[in-house]
Image (cartoon, coloured by chain):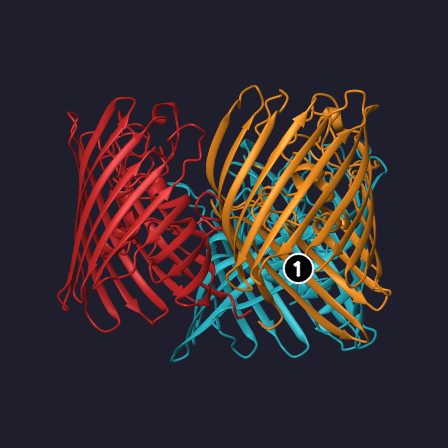
Chain colours: A red, B orange, C cyan
C-alpha cells in the first residue's frame, strides 16, 4: 500500500564481556552473539510509517516501530510489540504535535551528543542513563548513582510532544508524559528542550522533571528527579567534537542523590567509508558518599554501502566508591561494589 | 510484495474520566492519553491482507490484523500478536468460508447498529457487551447484568464462519467457534445472523448460543448464555436512525440472569466534513433483583481528509440497583454498586 | 519500500485427534480447528526480508519471520515476535555467513527428507524431533526416547551459520549456537552438514553436538546429545523416494539414552495439481529398557493454484515399551506409557 513505508535495521555483533565486582562476578567473562539496543551499533527494528498531506501546510503522520532482539527473535523494550515508537502526529506551520509512545527531547539530545550515536560498546547510555534494568533510576542508597535520564525519560508512554518549527536554526521541544495515576502526580514527566543548529555547530539544552520511578518499588514510590543538560558539538570537518555536561538531583523519601555527568567525544572520517569514534563519559557524585565512574570508549566503522556497515568497538568502565555503572545487558550487579567492566564487540548493521 | 496490502489505523485521544461507586472510587477522576479499542473512535491496528483470484468465481484471502495500544506500544487483546484478526478464507459464488480468529456476526450487527461505530466515549459496547475485563460475561450474583454479547462472541477463536452471497439485499451468516475441550461442549459458540439491506434501510437479526464463560472461574465453569437481537437502521439523509433491541438469558450453575438491552441513536452530517452522533443505550434486568443502567452519549467528528479525522465525545452511565456497568478501561469495580461514570475525550484518527 | 519483501503463509485445518495412554487420556478424542507449525501443511507465518547487492559478488540480507497461530492470533514459538527467523547475513563468492536466530542444517536435512515437508498429521518431527513441549529432549528414565534433533537444534538462537558455495552439487554448512553461559559449555550447539545434489538425487549427512537441554531441569542440567543422520532421496519422476537413518546418544548425569531413527517415504504426483504422500517413521531404543515407536502416515494435496492448496492427512503412532511419542500439540502425556495416537486433518494453505 502506498500509504505505508516499511523500514528497519538488522544489527548483530559478537560481544566479549569481562568484569569484576569483587563478588559473584569476579573476573567473569562471557562471549555472546548479541542484538541489543544498548551496545550494538543500533537497535534492531522493523518500522511502519506514513504521512498524509492534508493541504494548507498541514500533514498527519504515524509511526509504529518494533524493537527486535535478533539473537532470539523476541521483542525488545520488555515485550512491547512496538517498543520503539507508536505515535500519531499533526504537522503545521506552527510546529508538530505527536501523541503516543515516542522518543523524548532528552534522548534526542543524548543521541546527537554521542559520537557513537547511543550505541556500540561505549554508548553514553551506560553512564548518562545508567543501569536501566538492574536498578530503579536514581535509587539512593547502596547504588546511588544512576543516570540523569531516567528509564521512562528515554521513550515516554502516554506522552504529548510539541516541536516548534525551525527559526533560523533555533527550535524547541516540549514533552509531557502522563503518569495516569488518579489524584497523583506519580509518573508524570515533563521535558523541555532548546536547540540551535548552524552548519557546523549545534547547541542543545534540556530540562527534565521526572516523577516516574522507572522500576517502582516502595523505596521509589515518591521518587522525583530533576536534571539539566547542556551539549555542544562542532564539526571541524577533519573531526567532529561532542561535549555534554549534565547535573541531576534525585529525591526519594527525603534521601537526596546528586550527581554531575560529562561527555567528551569525537568522530573522524578516515576515508569516505571509514570512521573512528572516541568518547569519555563520567559520572561524579555530589553526595556525602561521593562516588564516580569513568567510561573510556573507542569505535570503528567501515561502510560496505550506505545501508550496510561493519563495525568494532571497545569500552571500559571504572567505578570508584559505591558507583556501580556497568555495560548494558551485562550488568551483573550483586549488591557489591562494581570495580570494572569491559566490552569488546564486532558486528554488522544492515538498514532497509 | 504485490500479494500483500498493508493497512491500519492510528487513533489517540485525551480522556477525562470521573466516576463514583460509593466505595474505593468515590468521586474519582483521572486524565489519560489513551488508545483503546473501546472508547477511541476506532481501535488502533496494523493489518496485512491479500486476496488471490483462483478463477471460476473462486478466490482465496487472508487477514492478519494487530491491535495496538498506541500509548504504550503494547498489543491489545491480551497480548495477542494478531488480536483483531487471523484468518484464511475461500470465496465462491455460493458464499464465503473463513477459518481462524475473526469478527462474529453478533459483533457485525452491533457495529452496524451503533452510530458511534462501537467507539467513542459512548460506545454501545459498554452496555451491550458489558464490563469485559472486570467480570465474566453474564456472571450472576453480585454484578448480575453484563451484556448480551459475551467477550468470546466479539471475536471468536478457533472459528468457522460461513457467509451467504447477497440475494436481493438478503444475506445470512453462521459462525461456529470450537471450545476444543475434549468430551465437553464448554467453550463452544454458535451464532446465526440474518440481514436485509436496501438503499436506505437495514434490518438485522442475530442469535447467540454461547458456552464460553469469557473469564472462566469455578462459578462460570458451566456457564451458558443465549441471546437474540434485532436491529433496524434507516437513513433519512438529513440523519440516520439506529435502533436495536436484545434479550439474553444466562445460566450458571442453575442461577439465571435475564436482561433486555436497547439502543436508540442517530448520526447526522452537519457539513460534508462534520458529523454529530447521539445515542442512548439501556440494560434492564429481568431477574428478581432487577437492575438497570442507562448510557447517554454524544459525539462529534470533523474530517481533515478522508483518512484523518478529529473527534470529541462525551458519555455518562447511570446504574440503578445492582447494575455495575462502566466505561471500558476505567471500570474500577470494587464490588460495591456503581453509581455513575463519565468520560469525555478528544482525539485524532488517522487511517492508512 | 522497495527494500523489503513481505511474504507469508496462512494455513488452517480441522483436526480430529484420538489417543490412549491407558491413563488420563484413555480413548480420548478431540476435534479442533488448528494452525500449528507441527501438523498443518506448513506453519503460518508473516515475514519481512530483503537483500542488498554490495557489488563484487557481495550481498547483505536479512530475514524477520513471525510464526502465527491463526486460530488464536497468538505468536508461535513461545511468544517470540519473530519466532521463525531473525537474522542478518553476508553472501560472498566464498559462501554465506548468517547471524541470529535461524534454521539449522539439521532441520534442513529433516525438511528435505520428509515427503510431508515436516508438516501434516504425519510429520517426521513427531518421531525425529520428539515430544517437544512435554519433555526435555533426550531425557532418560521414564520417557527415554525422544528425537535425535533437540528442540534447540531446529532453530538456533545466538547462532552463526556458514554455508559454502555449491561445488558441482556439493555443499556444506556449519552452525554454531552459543549457550552464552559464563564459564560453561552449557547450551552450546554445534552442527555440521554435508550435501550432494544432482538432478534426481540428494544425499545429506549431518552431525549434531548439542549441549542444550531443551527444557532445562535439574535432571538435564548437564545434558549432552550427539547425533548423526544420513539421508538419501531419489526422484523417479512417477514418484520421489525419501529415506533417512539417524542415531543419537544422549548423556544426562551419566545415564545414557541411545536410539536409532528411520524414515522411509515417498510422494507422487497424480495429476499436475494432485499429490499423494506416504511415510513411515520409526524410533528404536538401544538401551536396556529398549523401546520403539512407529508412525504410519498418508497425505494428499490438491493445488487450487500455485499459492493455494487444499490438503488432508492421517497419521497413527504406536508405542512399545516405555516409548511415549505422540502427535505434536496433542501429546497429553501423563507419565504412563502411551499406547497410540491418531490424527486426521483437512485444511487449506494460502501462501503470499
Q: Tell me the quarter of the picture where residue B268 sits.
A: bottom right
Which is more toward the observer, C317 or A173? A173
- Image quarter for residue C250? top right
* In this picture, residue C202 sits left or right of residue A310: right
In the displayed structure, does residue C324 sit left or right of residue C219?
right
- Quarter holding the C terminus of chain A is bottom left
Q: Is residue C301 above or below residue C151?
A: below
User: Which residue is depicted at the point 71% across and 47% down?
Assistant: C328
Q: What crowding class fits label 1: few (fewer than 14 Cα within 10 Å), some (14-19), or many (20 or more)? A: many
Q: Would residue A309 appear left or right of B254 to someone viewing this image?
A: left
Residue identifier under label 1? B63
Q: How many marks?
A: 1
Q: Position of residue A59 (x, y in %)?
A: 43, 64
The residue lying toward the viewer, choosing from C153 and A338, is A338
Q: Please indicate whether residue C26 sits to the left or right of residue C51 in the image.
A: right
Q: Is residue B162 visible?
A: yes
Q: What chain letter is assigned to the residue under label 1?
A: B
Place of residue C160 in the rendered image (x, y in percent of width and height, measured from the top left): 45, 58
- Asked whether residue C99 appears in the rendered view, the answer is no
Helix, strand or loop at mark 1: strand
Q: Point out the image quarter for the N terminus of chain A.
A: bottom right
Q: Nearer the viewer, residue C147 or A246?
A: A246
**Which one is nearer the viewer's eye here, C124 or C155?**
C155
In the rendered image, residue A148, in percent from the top left (x then y), is placed at 25, 40
In the rendered image, residue B101, in percent from the top left (x then y), is placed at 70, 51
Amino acid at each position: 500500500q502506498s500509504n505505508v513505508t516499511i523500514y528497519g535495521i538488522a544489527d548483530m555483533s559478537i560481544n566479549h564481556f569481562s568484569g569484576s565486582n569483587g563478588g559473584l562476578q569476579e573476573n567473569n567473562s562471557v562471549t555472546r552473539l548479541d542484538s541489543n539496543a544498548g551496545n550494538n551499533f543500533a537497535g534492531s527494528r522493523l518500522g511502519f510509517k506514513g504521512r498524509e498531506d492534508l493541504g494548507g501546510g498541514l500533514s498527519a503522520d504515524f509511526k509504529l516501530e518494533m524493537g527486535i532482539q535478533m539473537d532470539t527473535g523476541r521483542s525488545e523494550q520488555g515485550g512491547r510489540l512496538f517498543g520503539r515508537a507508536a505515535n500519531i502526529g499533526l504537522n503545521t506551520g506552527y510546529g508538530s504535535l505527536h501523541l503516543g509512545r515516542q522518543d523524548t527531547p532528552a534522548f534526542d539530545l543524548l543521541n546527537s551528543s554521542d559520537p557513537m550515536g547511543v550505541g556500540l560498546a561505549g554508548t553514553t547510555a551506560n553512564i548518562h542513563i545508567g543501569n536501566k534494568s538492574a536498578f530503579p533510576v536514581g535509587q539512593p542508597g547502596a547504588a546511588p548513582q544512576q543516570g540523569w535520564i531516567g528509564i521512562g525519560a528515554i521513550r515516554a508512554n502516554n506522552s504529548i510532544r510539541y516541536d516548534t518549527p525551525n527559526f533560523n536554526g533555533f527550535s524547541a521541544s516540549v514533552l509531557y508524559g502522563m503518569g495516569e495515576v488518579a489524584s497523583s502526580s506519580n509518573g508524570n514527566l515533563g521535558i523541555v528542550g532548546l536547540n540551535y543548529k548552524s552548519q557546523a555547530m549545534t547547541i542543545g539544552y534540556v530540562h527534565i522533571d521526572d516523577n516516574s520511578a522507572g522500576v517502582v518499588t516502595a523505596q521509589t514510590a515518591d521518587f522525583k528527579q530533576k536534571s539539566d543538560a547542556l551539549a555542544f558539538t562542532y564539526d571541524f570537518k577533519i573531526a567532529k567534537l561532542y561535549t555534554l555536561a549534565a547535573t541531576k538531583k534525585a529525591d526519594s523519601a527525603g534521601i537526596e542523590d546528586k550527581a554531575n555527568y560529562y561527555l567528551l567525544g569525537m568522530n573522524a572520517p578516515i576515508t569516505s567509508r571509514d570512521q573512528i569514534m572516541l568518547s569519555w563519559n563520567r559520572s561524579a557524585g555530589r553526595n556525602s558518599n561521593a562516588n564516580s565512574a569513568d567510561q573510556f570508549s573507542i569505535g570503528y566503522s567501515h561502510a560496505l554501502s550506505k545501508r550496510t556497515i561493519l563495525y568494532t568497538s571497545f569500552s571500559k568502565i571504572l567505578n570508584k566508591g559505591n558507583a556501580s555503572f556497568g555495560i548494558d545487558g551485562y550488568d551483573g550487579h550483586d549488591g557489591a561494589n562494581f570495580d570494572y567492566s569491559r566490552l569488546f564487540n564486532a558486528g554488522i548493521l544492515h538498514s532497509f
